[in-house]
Amino acid sequence: MIKKILYPFHLFLSRYLDIFAMLFLIMNAVIWYLNDSNMDVTKYRLFQQMSYVLLAIALTNFYRFDLKSFVKDNLFFLAIFALGLYNASSIIVDFNGYSLDMGLRSKELILEAFPTFLIILVSFRLVHKNAFIVGLISLLGLMVFYQSLAIGNKHFGLKVFEGITLVVSAERHQAILNNPNVLGEYAFIGIYVSFFIAMITKPFGLKIIALLPIPILGYGLILSGSRTALFMTIILYIMINVYLAYFKKASKIIILLGNLLLLSGIVLISLGLFSNYIEMIRDEISFSGRDTIWINTFKIINDNLIKGVGYNNFTFVYNELFYSVTSPHNMLLGVTAELGILGLLLVIGWFIYSIVKNHNAIIKNKGKEENTYLILFNVFYITFFIGQMTEASFLKLSTIFPLFLMLQAFNQNIISEYGEEPNLLLNWFLMGVSFIALFIFFGAYLKSISDLYLYGILVTSLMVIIYDVVTSIERLFKDPLTD
């Protein structure tokens, strides 16, 4: 009787979250790299405001949230969060003879970015599967739109769209974005999403339709001249073939047909066809100055190996030492430079944990429908990791890292459907770790030992209350509500 009364409220609240989460997904792909000065000024505030609204809506769905499993699945992220705050307590950096504490700046930047990352992991864990797929389809449409603008500029003389100039720099197109590499990255994201939709769709005809945007996305990638995006796309296709044996029959046929088309394209290229298009991809053998950046980054790491220079402090420190504004252009070097050697180990562990957990589930449950999702998650993780060897978007406010977090949350939602037996000892251990993370997070604001003691009592009591409330609600809804 109680469930019947509460069901309409459950349906409204869950659908409200689904809709706003999808709007958030699209917003994330719009604000960061738009070539618009007004957006540059407001994008951080807009992202935070949207994040807090998303959190407020997610909190109305708290009865569906499993704190213990969330902490277990996101232990690496929480540990990186806590490590960054701990390191920020004191980060002394030597600037050619004078020292400066970069900890306060690091703490401010962490508290600006990481809570929003946490909100994404919490909220998208509660989003329904079909809603997330609709969001991905919308994202695909947006990625095709960006590439279409570049194509329109190339062939139809399109110069301006809604007051934003379409820029071409050194024969590299960027549409209405502020960087041609971003256009290439968006082309890669679109190609991945196109494959994702095609692989999870059952009717063969719909699979073909889902793949139709790929020629537009591929041509947009070529126009961008982004070698990183091209390399990531190649790795993406290789990884899909690595998992070929675990796909359903219709998907295998699609992949094999794709292999045939790819082989035909290679033959035509070797015969000299499409030479004009191939030349659009910059083929000079160089790192575009990245090698110098990497060498200098090693010097920064050597002086700050334990704590790093602080989250998001790399560009500031690099400019002070080497008089150049740049990013590390390598995820591993960037993480080590900013968060120290332990931060590097945690990031690598995060990728290994995610990939191995999915892979084991794929092997153990071969033939299950959910395996296709897990394969596609692993394909993205591996491709993203390799692509970050020449970029540094990980743990940053950008388009692709929040997308990575959304996929992580969706991945955790999918894998929970396998119904693993709970490990009570591990669950309580992870509850303790979450307590320590919260203690470090809020304790960073406190000034005295007495404040810290009182705060410890408060947090302990709060954790007990939350656990008791969640357990009570679980008993009330012992049979999960379904749509």
Image: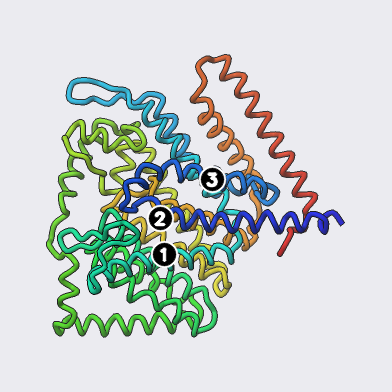
x and y, in percent, of residue 393 in the image = 34, 49
Residue type for callout 2:
Val
Q: Is residue 290 above or below residue 181?
A: above
Q: Nearer the viewer, mark 1 or mark 3?
A: 1
Q: Is residue 276 left or right of residue 232?
A: left
For mark 2, what is the residue?
A: 30
Q: Earlier in the sequence, mark 1 or mark 2?
A: 2
In this rendered view, identify the residue nearer to me: 218 or 200: 218
Between the residue at mark 2 and the residue at mark 3, the CA separation in whole angstroms equals: 19 Å
The residue furthest front is 163
For the residues bearing labels 2 and 3, Cβ distance under 8 angstroms? no
Q: Residues within 10 Å of mark 2 (few under 14, many from 20)?
A: some
Residue occupying the point 18% across, 38% down: 324
Between the residue at mark 1 and the residue at mark 2, the CA separation in whole angstroms equals: 9 Å
For mark 3, what is the residue?
A: 119
Q: Quadrant of the N terminus?
A: bottom right
In this rendered view, identify the residue nearer to me: 81 or 178: 178
Q: Quadrant of the C terminus?
A: bottom right
Q: Earlier in the sequence, mark 1 or mark 3?
A: 3
For mark 1, what is the residue?
A: 142
Q: Residues within 10 Å of mark 3 (few under 14, many from 20)?
A: some
Q: Is residue 222 visible?
A: no
Q: Is residue 20 above or below residue 193?
A: above
Residue type for callout 3:
Ile
